[in-house]
Every structure is written in structure tokens, then in C-alpha cells.
Image: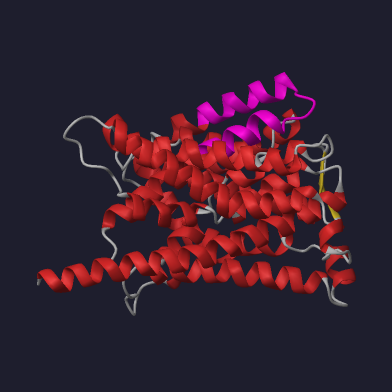
Amino acid sequence: MGGVSPTQNPLRTQQFPAILLLVAAGLGLLAANTPLHAPIAGVLDAHIAVPGTGIDLSVAHWISDGLLAIFFFVVAMELVYELTRGELNSMRRALQPAIAAAGGVIVPIAVYLFLAGGAETAHGWPIPTATDIAFALGVLAVFGKGLPSGVRIFLLALAILDDIVGIVFIAILFAQDLNAIALGLGVLTTIAFGVLSRMLGERRRPLVVTAMLILGVVTWGLIVSSGVHATIAGVLLGLAMAQSPAMRTRFALEPWVNGAILPVFAFSAAFVVVPQVSLGDLSPAFWAITVALPLGKIIGIAGFGWIAMRIRPRGTPPALVFPDLLAAGALGGIGFTVSLLLANLAFATDAATRDQAILGVLAGSLIALMLCAALVSARAASYRRRAEASS
């Protein structure tokens, strides 16, 4: 978790992409509340259509539905790896992070509904369930020097399981006017994409790669036309891809995702006007998300993780002890990317509440970031002292 090699691309590190995301979101929020608002809003609201397809999206939706599908494509490939060869490839290894992840979903939902369970805001409950893996690992890399590798592995497993939940929410809760024929055709093109990926092996096959690119774009178009959120196309294609070419593809796309796609989305998603109202007039959704992300995640992850320690098989060491679970819970409260997407989806028809929900995501994630910086630093210092004492 230490320094960066002089020859290492900073976009492949953990620290720099997290800083880039934070800066992009800050710039988006700043630009939305300055005279730059009108020209940038004009660009984001401009529509671009694909001739002959019926697909006509604003620039903002091309970012959230198009570019972000590539991010979910990379996430899905990592999910497959972790579930087959990585840290979640057995029930024994996955037990504590799985139970902790369940708590990190259930408790924030309960906190949200307690604070914003009214008819107008209740459907925002999925928003505080997400963990931004890039941000969380970036914070861990900056403040966690000296922490055992198990903390990073646990957090990675936790965030991946959170991603699965977020993907399920997006697929099930936010599908609109489902077109079964388009969805069925999208599944077929996904299968064809997966079959072609198994023809790549270790050799470069330009024709196969070209055919896969075409199938990928067609699949995305069909999923958009089906009424299922477009990012699910990226998930389906990532899950279908053969493991070896998937890892090469993920490696190739990583700098583009970290350096362009996620910062552009963060800028666009955070481009909201801060409401000129008193604190008491802010939407319950704002307060619920602001509280549920840091507090709900800490209570849920640490509490359920502690329960997992109590019920683990006899003789099996816990993945993390309780103080480390508190630090992981704070890290889990950094919702950011997927939470911003869920906020846009949950309040798509209510612009005022949507903007306040987005502000809640930013505020809650910032509070969680400050909490986890303190907790992770304290735990890292404790481990360093212990290592020095034993040396």
C-alpha cells in the first residue's frame, strides 16, 4: 500500500484516481453554482440521436447510460474474477464479508426509511446502499500504511458484494416499459459476444475483436431499447466474457475508466445547484442519505461483521477483528459513483429532490471519508507500533 513506482501509470494506482474523482465532483458542484452554469447546462441538456434506432439521449444521459456502461463492464469482469479465482471463490472466505455486506445494505436502508419514509421520498432507499470501491481503496492506500493485507482484501470483497446488490437494484427497480423482444435479442447478442471471446485465447485476432466490438454496441442499443437501464448491458457483457481476455481487456480499459469515464460522470452527476433554502427546508432525502451513508454503513458493516465473527466455523480465524470492522464500515460509507447513479434514477422525475439527493450523497460520502481517514489512520498506527515492538 506504499509508494508508486516512477514508471507506474498513476491512473493504475489507488490514490490518484480517488483524488481525481473528488476534484471532478468538486468542479462540477462549483461550476453549477457560478455563471458557468448556463453554458455547461446547455451542453449537458443537448440531445444526440442515433439515426434509424429511436435512441435519442441528452449528453448527460450519454455519460450516465453510455460511458458508465463501460465502467460496469469492467466491474463485471472483476466480479467474475473474484468469484472464481479471487477473494470470494469459496464460502469460507466469503462468509464474513458477505454477512457484513448484508448489514451494509440493510441498515442504511432502515436509516433512510426512518428519516425519509414518506410517500414522496421513500423510493430513494437504494441510494445509500452502495460503496465506491475506487474511492475506498484510494483512501485506504493514502491513510492505511501498515495495515495488514487482510483489511484491503476484506474491503475489496465487501465493495464487490455491494456492487452486485447495486446492479440488481438497477436491473430490477429501474426498468421502464419492458420490451421483452429487445431484451431477448440483447441476451442473444451477449451470448454471441461471450462465444467469440472464447475464440481469442492468447492470440490477437483483429476480426474477432472487431466483431465483439460491434456486438457490444448492438447489445447496448438493444438493452437501452428494452427499457432496462443501459449500464446492465455492460454488466451482461462483462459476465459473459472469457476470463483470460477479460483480464487483458480490464487492464487496457482501467486507465480510461479511472482517468476519463469516472471523472466525467462525477462532474456531470455533481453538476447541481445548491438550493437556496434553510437547513430545515431541505428534503428528507438529503438528510436521510447524509446520515445513512456514514452512520448506517458503520453500524451495518461493523455490527453484522461482529455477528459473523460469532457464528464462524470453529477454528476459523475472523477475516477482521472488530476495530478493523469499524474502519471498514467507515470506508463503506463512501458511496459516490453508484450512489450518484442511483440518486439520478430514483428521483428521475423530480429534479428538485434529485439534486438534493445528489448533495446528500456528496455530503454523506465526505463525512464518511473524514471518519474513515481518522479510523484507518488510527488502526494503521496501531499495527505499525505492534510491528516495531515485535521487531
**Which residue is outermost to the bottom?**
6
- Residue 330 screen position, x and y as percent: 48, 56
Task: Indicate whether 59 appears above or below 73.
Answer: below
Task: Indicate whether 229 appears above or below 26.
Answer: above
Q: Residue at x 55, y 56 (%)?
A: 334
Left or right of 306 in this view: 135: right
Quadrant that contains the C terminus: bottom left
- Residue 262 screen position, x and y as percent: 60, 59
Pick the residue in front: 377 or 10: 377
Q: Residue at x 68, y 45 (%)?
A: 342
- Residue 311 screen position, x and y as percent: 30, 30
Q: Residue at x 66, y 62 (%)?
A: 363
Colour mode of the rendering? secondary structure
Q: Is residue 173 magenta?
A: yes
The answer to whether one can see residue 80 in this image is: no
The image quarter containing residue 313 is top left
The image quarter containing residue 190 is top right
Q: Which residues are magenta?
A: 164-192
Left or right of 33 in this view: 226: left
Q: Is residue 73 magenta?
A: no
- Residue 164 screen position, x and y as percent: 51, 37
The answer to whether one can see residue 52 in this image is: yes
The image quarter containing residue 257 is bottom right
Quadrant that contains the N terminus: bottom left
Pick the residue in front: 384 or 347: 384
State whether the magenta stretch is mostly helix, strand or loop. Answer: helix
